[in-house]
Image (cartoon, rainbow, N blue to C red):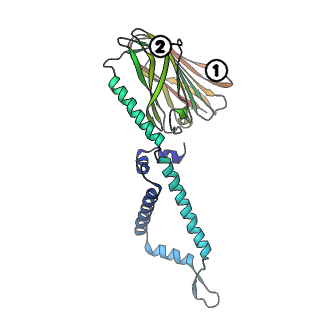
Amino acid sequence: MSLMDRIAAKPSVRKFFEGKTFIGVLVAGVAIVTGAITVLGEISSADKQVAKWLSNAVKRDPVSQALELKPVPEVVLAGIILSWAVLIALVVWAATRRFTRTKEQKSLDEMMGSVRQIIAQGKQDDPIKTWISVHDVYLIGKDFSGTFTRTAIVKTVGQRLHFFEHRIETAVNADAAESLAAIRYKVRDLGNQKNNIVYLPSENEPFRKKACLFFLPPVEQGETRKFEISYEWPGMFNRLKTKADDIGFIAKTLEIMSVFRTEVYLHDDAPGKLKCTITGKRYDNQSLEGKEYSVNGWRGAGFVYETKEVPAGDLDFTLKIEMNS
């Protein structure tokens, strides 16, 4: 992620630019720069600054030995001033354009507010969803982009299940994403044709997204539903360039989970090799093995973690991945 993206992602920066016009940001920027120059001028030694300016601005006539100001063509001076003015205006214009909320963004905010209200009012007092199985696949590209696919089966215990919220979060090392559409977020039902699953965004931050998944029709008591979630996030694994990263699944299940499986692979053209260790809870029948992967021209090597017959309760399947040179 570029330095501009990291700065832009800071809440204080976004708050400064949002709601301001181009002229407003320009005036504020000029005031800030002027104030900074004034402070620096007061701190710096005045005599040194004057001496430096004089040495660059005057010359001595070789015949008369008289001091004269160096000629500065007005055209050159005007060009310098104009260049700086254009540069400052372009920077301010880009920043203002970046943070100006469009009608589409305002509509998205209003829709997410409605979705959050649905979640709050439709929230169940007790957990009603249990995980029967979860199969996650992480593909780490040669540019450290990430592709994620989850195939899962849920079962309703007690009351019917209308929806649940899915959260995605990456480190700030990743590329900032404007929306769920920008990371090609998709959900689909893998059961019969009568069932469907759709999503609405409920939170949209540069490095954190939430989607509310709606089951159509709702999952009735004792019924199971199989579905798939997938997305592609540029720079998702940039952290691996310098340090370790964590992947995994943390949730709560009301009944025995039949199987949990995670696969993580690094593209063959990526620098280095992948290393993987278990850092979450220890379960009976768990295993971690190396494996090759090849699908639709994508080739890589990595690891497969699997455990079966997991007792009901709090789940914590966490793996630490890092690069070996």
- Quarter that holds the N terminus: top right
Residue placed under numbered mark 1 in the picture: 292
Circle 2 packing at 10 Å, graded few (<14), some (14-19), many (20+), is many
Percent across and percent down for residue 307 are 49, 13
Q: What amino acid is found at the position of numbered circle 2 in the picture?
A: Arg
Circle 1 packing at 10 Å, graded few (<14), some (14-19), many (20+), is few
Residue drawn at 41 percent across, 22 percent down: 164
Residue drawn at 44 percent across, 22 percent down: 214
Residue placed under numbered mark 2 in the picture: 225
In the image as oriented, which residue stretches furthest toward the right? Answer: 297
Residue drawn at 56 percent across, 19 percent down: 304
* Alpha-carbon span between mark 2 and mark 1: 30 Å
In the image as oriented, which residue stretches furthest toward the left? Answer: 125
- Residue 259's tag is none
- Quarter that holds the C terminus: top right
Q: Earlier in the sequence, mark 2 or mark 1?
A: 2
In-front residue for pair 165/268 = 165
Vertical order, 280 against 109 (above or below): above
Residue drawn at 64 percent across, 87 percent down: 62
Res 203 → quadrant: top left
Percent across and percent down for residue 65 are 60, 89
Vertical order, 108 against 99 (above or below): above
Percent across and percent down for residue 84 are 55, 64
Q: What amino acid is found at the position of numbered circle 1 in the picture?
A: Glu
Total number of numbered labels?
A: 2
Res 156 → quadrant: top left
Q: Is residue 183 visible?
A: yes
Percent across and percent down for residue 254 are 38, 13
